[in-house]
Structure formats: C-alpha cells, structure tokens
Image: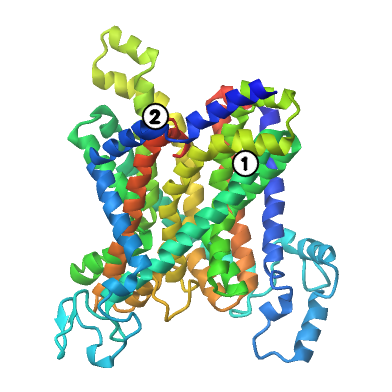
Amino acid sequence: MRAYIIRSLLQSLIVLNGVLLIVFLMLHLTGDPAGVLMPIDATQEDLARFRRDMGFDRPLHVQYFYFLFGHGARNRGVLLGDFGFSYRHEVPAMGLVVEHIPATVYLAVISLIIALAIAIPAGILSAVFRNTWIDHVSSVISMLGQSLPNFWMGLVVIIVFAVYLRWLPTSGYEGPQHVILPALTAGLYATARIMRMMRSTLLEVMGLDFVRTARAKGLGETAVIIRHALKNASIPVVTLVGLELGLLLSGTVVTEVVFAWPGVGFLTVDAIVNQDYPVVQAAVTLLAIMFIGVNLTVDVTYAWLDPRISYR
Amino acid sequence: MRTIAVEPTLDVLERVAPEGSSDLQRALRKLLRRPPALFGLFCVIVVVTWAVVPGLFAPLSPLDQSLDRYLKPPGYVDAQGQTYWLGTDQQGRDILSRVIWGSRISLFVGIATVLVSGLVGVTLGLVAGYFGGKLDAVISRIVDTALAIPFILLAMALIAILGPSLQNIILAIALRTWIIYARVVRGEVLTLKEREFVVGAKATGCTTLRILAVYLLPNVFSSTIVVATLYLGRMIIIEASLSFLGVGVPPPTPTWGGMLSDGRAFLETAWWIAFFPGVVLMLTVLGVNLLGDWLRDVLDPQMKRAAE
C-alpha cells in the first residue's frame, strides 16, 4: 500500500514536470518568444532589449532552468508560483488565476451534483428494468447527451429559459439562480457517461454468484439491489466520478465563455485572445495541478477501497 | 518457417477481413434491422453529400451578403421571390447555404484529426505494448501528461501562437486525441504478443519491424476502426468549439462553430442564427455515433467496454 502511494506520487511529479515543460515550450514554438510576447508594433531595439532581459538569448535548457527556479531579483521561478505579471491587468499572473479558481470549482461541483442526481437513479432504473421502455428512453437520452455540443446546448437553454420564459438569468455570477443553467450545460457529458457506467456495472454485478445467493435465501428484489448489488457496483462509479470532477475542473471552459461565468476558463480565453501569456501559462499549470491532485486522490482511495489493486 | 507463417496469416485474415460476402451480408442485414443505425447512416450520407458538392444544394453563395435582408427570420421571401428557409444572419447571408458549406470544414478537420491521431496513437501503442519496460513507462507518462493539461486551453493557445491555419488546428486537436488509440492498441498488443503466432514468428527469426507491421498491426486494425468512428463525432465537436471560441478557420469561411459564435450576440433578437447550425452539428455527431455503435457491434462486440 505504501509502496503504491509512493509510486503514484513519483509518477505525479514526473507528469507535473512534463506539464511545466510543455507550458515553457509553448512560447518557443515559433522560435521567437519575444515576438509572441511583445506587442506587434514593438521596435527592433525593444525586442532586442526584451530578449536580453528575459534571457531568451541563452540556450534553451538554461532558459528552462530560469523558468523553473527564477532568474534575477524580479523573477522567483514557477516552482514558487511566480509566472510573471499579467500584461493586461498588471498584477501577478498566478494571483489573478487563483482569484478565479473558486468560481470554476463552484461550477464544477454543482455540475457534478446535478449530473449525479440525474445519472445515478436513471442508471439504476435502466439496469433494473433492462430492455423495457425505461431502459430505452434513458439510453436515447444518454446517446443524445453524448452527441450534443454542450456550448450549443448552453445557447439553446439561454434562448428558452432566459430569453423567452425569463425564468433564469442569461449570465453572471451573483445568486444561486445564476448557476443552474451553466451547471446543467457543463455537466451534460458527465451525466451521460455516469449513467452508462452505472447501468453497465450494476448489470454486471447482478449476474454474479453472491447476488444469486442473496436471492436464493429469500431476500426481496429491492433489498438485493440496494443492500448487495449497489454496494458492489459503486466502486467503479466512484472512480469515474472522481475522474469526471478532474475533467470538469478544466472542462468548463466553453460553458464559462457562453455564460460569461468569471472562472479560470473565461479568464484564460480572454488572456489568449489578448496575448497575455503569463496568465495562460499560470492557468494551464494550475488546472493541470488540480487534475493531477484529484487523480492522485482517486488512485489512493481506490487502492484503499479495493486492496487487490495495489499489486498490479 | 513457411508452415508457421501460414497459420498466422489465416488468423489475421479471420480477424480483419469480413470473411466473404456472407459476413458482409450479415452486417448489412443487421444495419437494416436497426432503425437508429439507419437514421445515423442517413444523416451521415446527407452531410457527406453536402460537403462534397455544396454548390448543388445551397440556394445561394455562403458569402452573398446584403444589408437589405439583415436578420430576417426563417421562411423570409425577398422581392425576387428567393426564399430563405432558415433565415439570414447579421450580414444578410443565407443561413441554409452557410450551414451546407460549413459541413466541409467540420468533416475535413474531423477526418484529418482522426487520421493524424490514429497514426501517432497506433504507432506509440504498438511500441509501448510490444516492448514494454522503460519505453512503455515513458510513453505512459507522456499519456498522463497529455491527459492532465487542460486541453481546450492548450489547443487555443497553440493556435493563437502558431496562427489559425487548417494544419495547425488539426495538429492542436490531435495533440490530445492520439491517447485513446495508444491506450486501446497497447492493451490489445499486451495480450496478442503472448499468442502462439507472434511467439512463433519471433522464434523463427522474424525482424521486430516485421512482427509489428505484419503480425500485430492487422490484428489491432478492427478495434482502431471502431475507436476512430466512436471518436470522429467528438473531433467534430472539438473543431466547432474552437471555431466558437474564435480560434477556428478564420472568417469569411463558413464554419458551424463560427456561425454559433456569430449568433451568440443575437440570442434575444434572432435565435435562428445560433440554433440551426447547432441542430445540424448535433445530427451529424449523432449520426456518426449511431453508425459507430453499429460498426462496433459488427466488428468487435468485446470492444464495448474498452471504448467506454
């Protein structure tokens, strides 16, 4: 168990280094990071001075070292969370991203709760009533859920619920009524996937011996499902839910743009459009760290729930 | 050597080719008995025809603009008797014509990304599965890294830095999507490489390249095809998302995502601009997914779990 946790931790560190390398190389893709970072109307002298100041004239591996551990008095390096200043907002890029994290986490968590509230009962019902109309309806819904582009669904729910029915606001971030439409939109794929997973694992478990034993000893069907089958079907579903949370944290980007939701995705899209790359680098890194963290937690929890997994 | 080589070839044939017409007929009969798959086939045929010969179906040029018909609702008829079945947009362009022409970019980018990411993913999956050990560990960490990065943001940033050309859009999407092929192929190769025909080939002194190309590649072909169909729809959605976010193929080229983005500004006054391109996008993806489901059942029933 401990060896497994240590190995997962080491692997996460390797992945983190990979993420930082990609974030670093991003600006070097065109071969001239100064040209990417500086405004289009910058003069040759400006560019030359900027290159020297930023250390862009040094070899690439030296630059990566500066990027990680800092360079000069003003830059402490990304390992200490210093991604430089946002050009547009003139505040530290990392601080700006951190300020927008709560809105994204809030949206992701509410989306997941709504997805679970729909997907778990629907998945159980379609497994229990397999091949009846209930099952067919929910499989049609899950197929549609996987085929709908979620940003388009966002626009349609705005047209219907905000513009015509006027039940809910079109965008913004004030009260609980603001989160409903974005959360439904962002949670669409998660709902479809959790529903399918719940159905298939429950069906699988219900074919196993211990369920037959439970039935044979005269337990009612409801008790068999709730007390025996569901409990055993929950492990893979829990893993999937963890993964979905990790995906949602960075997967709400398009939804945030559609609803002008002030989260990290909205901030970063705006930063990309305005070539504010320190913010982009900070946001990509922070979202990746959150994803890695959620996954590590899921891995460890899974090993703890199911001891067989430790010795793979 | 010859006798050992014959058996694997048969084995390969059995798994890959639809054995003779009877199997093909069975697959087609299955298709006819499945209304959802037929519906999917219909949607796909319509969109592909649009993409190949858009001029035959579009009533107007997708770029034909006129401020006289600014934001007209669906069914509007102008003075010349021309009907605008799906209405017009903020520049007076015919939505129906733009939707039809927009199918080109969606299908092209979708198919091209599937090909690029399939090529990379299958190669890395074969290598990781066959050699195992350190190489496998390295490829697995690359996969983990690609998974951890917030994909849409990275793709947007790359396109913004490199410029919004078709080639860059395809590369930016493929950067993430090769993973799924690599995973499926690696898993298959792990079991395949223990099978007699591979062990036998190795024992008779086949080169590694030959084992990979002749003995393993054809055997992972059917699952690769299944994954490709199941993910084609998602590629099309991703391309539309990027266009929607403003880093797709630049205007005036009509793209469904770009049209949705135009329509966002007019949700309160002209809902049809954002509505219709989305309907067609959804039906296309739904069609591809339904066909993918059918193909999966025909080619490899066991794939069902692996792809989910």
As shown in the figure, which amino acid type bears the numbered disc 2?
Thr
As shown in the figure, which amino acid type bears the numbered disc 1?
Gly
Residue at numbered disc 1: B125
For the residue labelled by badge 1, is the local secondary structure a helix, a strand or a loop? Answer: helix
Image point (69%, 69%), residue name: A29
State which quadrant residue B274 falls in: bottom left
Residue B91 vs residue A54: left or right? left
State which quadrant residue A256 falls in: bottom left
Q: Is residue B268 visible?
A: yes
Percent position of residue B43, x then y: 28, 56
| Residue at the extreme front of the image, as rendered | B2
- When the figure is inspected, residue A312 is found, relative to residue A257, above or below; the finding is above
Quarter of the image with the N terminus of chain A is: top right
- When the figure is inspected, residue B95 is found, relative to residue A13, above or below; the finding is below
Residue A2 vs residue A151: left or right? right
Percent position of residue B306, x then y: 48, 35
Q: Is residue A99 visible?
A: no
Quarter of the image with the C terminus of chain A is: top right
Are the two marked residues, 2 and 1, in contact with CB atoms closer than 8 angstroms? no
- When the figure is inspected, residue A218 is found, relative to residue B290, above or below; the finding is above
For the residue labelled by badge 2, is the local secondary structure a helix, a strand or a loop? Answer: helix
Image point (36%, 56%), residue name: A183
State which quadrant residue B208 falls in: top right
Circle number at residue A201: 2
Q: Disc 2 sits on a residue from what chain?
A: A
Q: Disc 1 sits on a residue from what chain?
A: B
| Residue at the extreme top of the image, as rendered | A217
